[in-house]
Amino acid sequence: MDRKLFVKHAFSALGIVAVAPLVNACSKNDSTTNSSAGSSGSSSDVTTDTSCSVSPTETEGPFPTKQPSSYVRSDITKGDGIGSPLTAKITIVNGNNNCTALAGAIVDIWHCDVDGNYSEYGGTQMQSTNFQSVHWLRGRQVTDANGLVTFKSIFPGWYQGRATHIHVHVYNASGTSLLVTQIAFPDALAITVNSTGSAYGYAKGTSGYTYNNADNVFSDSVAKEMATVTGSVDKGFDLSITIKANA
């Protein structure tokens, strides 16, 4: 079932990536063209913000989960073996209490597939395919005593106008919304996956890709939303991030 078991690849394993990028965070109008034809912005390293300042509030749309309470699960994959595996470890802390772990918080995440499409909606790539009846790459978990939730997913694809990202909505135990935010990925890693990962479904390449410093969400806040990601396309990735909410 796993695509890796039957697709032969011509590329060698990607090297370990640990980090996290900085971008010219204020360069929303940066139109520097990278080697990817038609791409917006430029790839550069980001130093992750490790302070206790609250994570940025971002838009929930345009593809939020319609009935998130229906998808309490840690495995949010499609089950088709397409995409490089990604284990996302997300820690929620309380920015109102010296960033202590926030136990019992409800955490929803959702993101697009390798082609840039979201379940529960029509194709984001102006495709005729309609995904309204499927619910993959969406899920809900409750934080443990350490404020941690873990999701099994795939490395997200991308679509025009956005850098690679994951949406996150955090609620308290009573269901009151605390924070809507997003998770950013290192530019160089996203480009590598989409340039060399065709055997795993990343076939669209990087022409037209939007880098973090040109992304309308991340351009002014990427250091506070950047995940640490390690691993490789053929072995899978591990993502970790601490999100600070006001509880």
Image (cartoon, grey):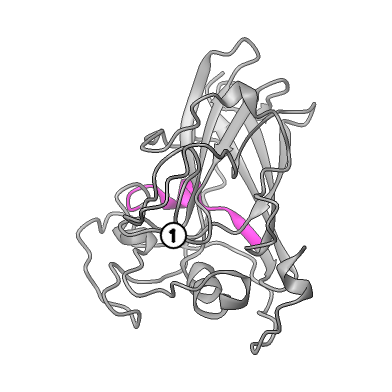
Q: Quadrant of the C terminus?
A: top right
- Which residue is located at x 65 percent, y 90 percent? 10
Tell which residue pokes out farthest to the top in this image: 174
- Which residue is located at x 56 percent, y 33 percent? 244
Q: Quadrant of the N terminus?
A: bottom right
Q: Between residues 182 and 243, which one lies in front from this camera angle?
A: 182
Whether 237 is drawn above or below 195: the answer is above
Does residue 13 appear in the picture of this structure?
A: yes
Residue designated by label 1: 158
Q: Is residue 221 located in the magenta-colored stretch of the structure?
A: yes
Does residue 99 appear in the picture of this structure?
A: no
Could you classify mark 1 by the number of other residues whose Cα lies within 10 Å: few (under 14), some (14-19), or many (20 or more)? many
Q: Secondary structure at mark 1?
A: loop
The range drawn in magenta is 219-229
Q: Is residue 154 located in the magenta-colored stretch of the structure?
A: no
- Which residue is located at x 64 percent, y 56 percent? 154
Q: Quadrant of residue 130?
A: top left
Image location (x, y in percent) of residue 59: 37, 35
Q: Between residues 107 and 84, which one lies in front from this camera angle?
A: 84
Image location (x, y in percent) of residue 35: 34, 83
Image location (x, y in percent) of residue 43: 40, 71
Q: Quadrant of residue 95?
A: top right
Q: Is residue 12 left or right of residue 201?
A: right
